[in-house]
Image (tube, helix red, strand yellow):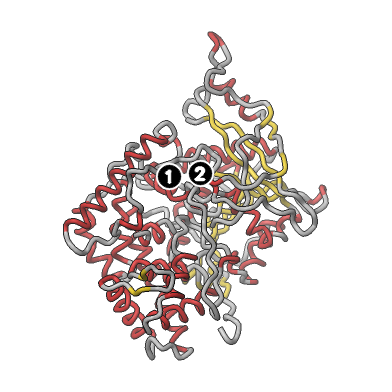
């Protein structure tokens, strides 16, 4: 089932925009077969100089490529500013810059303000790992329009993602992931199928992308960001990272503390956790968020139960019943327990999805599974870290109109590759069984899928080097960390641990007492004012500052 992948992939946006691989950069560094220097081979220093000396050939962005998720070319912004795309050459292996190189896909919208007020470029990573920044930024640009007064808005496809040397694990011999139960609780055959699926997926990744798999980790992506900074002509890297993007930002600060500019990390990943601990924390985070939803639902006369505890129990019972006996739906398919978890976990990413979730669960409890099935299809199979785009939010008064998504995106493959490259953890079925009681205590609804997701790196052909990328950054300027108390995918406690790990005087926390994944894109006025003040004027919020959530509109 896609549930564990959907939730753990959520550590955790696909909209539209693309970069055609045919776009090139001026003055590229050496490619395969094109070596310079003594004996016909460039030295590392010569190669680095060539990389840094590039001048991107910015062009109008073409229609999206399937590998980035498909869709239409990004439209000009309301003031007429066109989106521009380019490619940048980078070393495949930053330890051997004179060796093979690769393309990085970039997108930008130029600043709307006066040149004299321009600070530089603001580089975004929206999460995943595996999400295409080139595809995502145009859809979210209205959220950042105020920031464009002083910044060019810039994003990129990280290495292994989209048009930046995409990792591919697809293979006709592999079963569809929906055919594999991610919570093998019905005997040895289900567990054997899950173990075989992960093993065979790893082998397919090696067959299809073995040349790039060792080089897609977060540390190398952070080095790419410094190359982007240099090529764009900025003295410092000004950065906005969300969810996994906070881990990437922390890795950058560790490598280049003196080059950190104004940086915001929102929906902060806990840098102290290994992968099993991260999954366990997420189980608790999703459970806490669902209990918040249940309390909200009870206040509005939810048919599932008179209080939050009964609503949670009723949903667990409904999931178990659907797992045993799926409910037929009008399109000829079936609603099973996996789809319920997909729908619930997806809806917890944004509080404005809660009204639809309430309608969907009440209908399913009354043997009408259509709305919940549609919600699962709309929100449950994102494969990436950022929450679904607000334009995908279904209307509580109607079943969502779910358009078919391209099956060409490599988001899930990239998620697996980057996660397994970053981590040395290689868990076995015995490891999961030993920890399963903890996960069930954390969440009977979300815990099992997250526990078994720890097998996703079993048999991976590339050994990881550590539990997590290092983020300590003594000497770096203040980095603003925004933690959301109701965040399901990156629980609030991670912000404090990131602040501690970054170092004294570096991590600076802002608390959002709200719901959903991340804070800035929730639209909360207090959060936006605080973040904008830092990015635009360099003013940090007062120590211990707290922003409170704005209630949902009446009638929702």
Foreground: 236 or 490?
Answer: 490
Q: Is residue 3 above or below residue 207?
A: below
Q: Are marks 1 and 2 in contact (CB under 8 Å)?
A: yes
Task: State left or right for residue 13 relative to residue 458.
Answer: right
In three-dimensional space, the C-alpha distance between marks 1 and 2, rounded to whole angstroms, equals 9 Å
The x and y percentages for residue 356 are: 50, 77
Q: Residue at x 47, y 49 (%)?
A: 411
Q: Is residue 103 above or below residue 186?
A: above
Q: Label 2 neighbourhood size at 10 Å, few (<14), some (14-19), many (20+)? A: many
Q: Circle 1 sits on which residue?
A: 418
Q: Residue at x 57, y 34 (%)?
A: 103
Foreground: 94 or 552?
Answer: 552
Instruction: Quadrant for the C terminus, please.
Output: bottom right
Task: State left or right for residue 264 relative to residue 84.
Answer: left
The x and y percentages for residue 298 are: 43, 87
Q: Circle 2 sits on which residue?
A: 161
The x and y percentages for residue 285 are: 40, 68
Number of disc labels: 2
Instruction: Quadrant for the N terminus, please.
Output: bottom left
Task: State left or right for residue 323 relative to residue 288.
Answer: left
């Amino acid at each position: 089932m896609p549930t564990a992948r959907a939730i753990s992939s959520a550590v955790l946006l696909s909209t539209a925009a693309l970069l055609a691989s045919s776009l090139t950069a001026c003055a590229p560094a050496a490619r395969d077969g094109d070596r310079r220097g003594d004996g016909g081979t460039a030295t590392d220093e010569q190669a680095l100089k060539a990389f840094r000396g590039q001048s991107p050939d910015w062009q109008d962005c073409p229609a999206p490529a399937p590998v980035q998720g498909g869709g239409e070319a990004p439209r000009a912004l309301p003031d007429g500013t066109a989106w521009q795309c380019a490619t940048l050459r980078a070393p495949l292996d930053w330890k051997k810059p004179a060796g093979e190189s690769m393309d990085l896909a970039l997108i930008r919208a130029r600043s709307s303000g006066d040149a004299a007020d321009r600070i530089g470029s603001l580089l975004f990573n929206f999460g995943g790992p595996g999400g295409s920044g080139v595809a995502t930024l145009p859809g979210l640009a209205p959220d950042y329009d105020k920031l464009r007064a002083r910044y060019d808005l810039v994003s990129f496809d990280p290495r292994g993602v989209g048009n930046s040397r995409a990792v591919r694990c697809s293979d006709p011999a592999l079963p569809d992931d929906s055919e594999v139960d991610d919570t093998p609780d019905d005997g040895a055959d289900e567990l054997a199928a899950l173990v075989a699926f992960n093993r065979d997926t790893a082998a397919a990744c090696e067959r299809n992308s073995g040349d790039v798999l060792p080089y897609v980790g977060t540390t190398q992506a952070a080095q790419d960001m410094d190359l982007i900074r240099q090529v764009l002509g900025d003295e410092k890297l000004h950065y906005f990272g969300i969810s996994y993007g906070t881990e990437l930002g922390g890795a950058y600060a560790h490598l280049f503390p003196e080059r950190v500019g104004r940086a915001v990390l929102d929906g902060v990943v806990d840098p102290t956790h290994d992968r099993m601990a991260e999954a366990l924390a997420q189980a608790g985070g999703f459970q806490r968020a669902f209990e918040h939803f249940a309390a909200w639902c009870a206040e509005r006369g939810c048919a599932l139960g008179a209080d939050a505890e009964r609503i949670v129990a009723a949903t667990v019972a409904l999931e178990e019943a659907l797992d045993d006996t799926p409910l037929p739906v009008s399109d000829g398919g079936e609603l099973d327990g996996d789809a319920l978890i997909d729908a619930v976990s997806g809806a917890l990413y944004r509080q404005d999805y809660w009204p639809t979730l309430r309608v969907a669960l009440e209908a399913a409890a009354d043997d009408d599974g259509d709305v919940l099935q549609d919600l699962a299809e709309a929100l449950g199979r994102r494969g990436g870290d950022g929450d679904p785009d607000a334009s995908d939010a279904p209307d509580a008064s109607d079943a969502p109109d779910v358009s078919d998504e391209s099956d060409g995106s490599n988001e899930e493959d990239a998620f697996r590759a980057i996660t397994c490259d970053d981590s040395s953890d290689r868990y076995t079925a015995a490891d999961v069984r030993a920890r399963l009681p903890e996960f069930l205590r954390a969440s009977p609804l979300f815990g099992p899928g997250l526990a078994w997701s720890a097998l996703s790196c079993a048999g991976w052909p590339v050994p990881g080097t550590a539990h997590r990328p290092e983020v300590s950054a003594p000497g770096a300027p203040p980095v603003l960390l925004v933690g959301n108390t109701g965040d399901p995918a990156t629980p609030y406690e991670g912000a404090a641990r990131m602040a501690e790990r970054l170092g004294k005087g570096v991590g600076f926390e802002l608390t959002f007492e709200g719901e959903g994944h991340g804070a800035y894109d929730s639209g909360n006025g207090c959060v936006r004012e605080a973040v904008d003040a830092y990015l635009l004027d360099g003013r940090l919020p007062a120590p211990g500052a707290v922003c409170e959530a704005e209630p949902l509109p009446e009638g929702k």
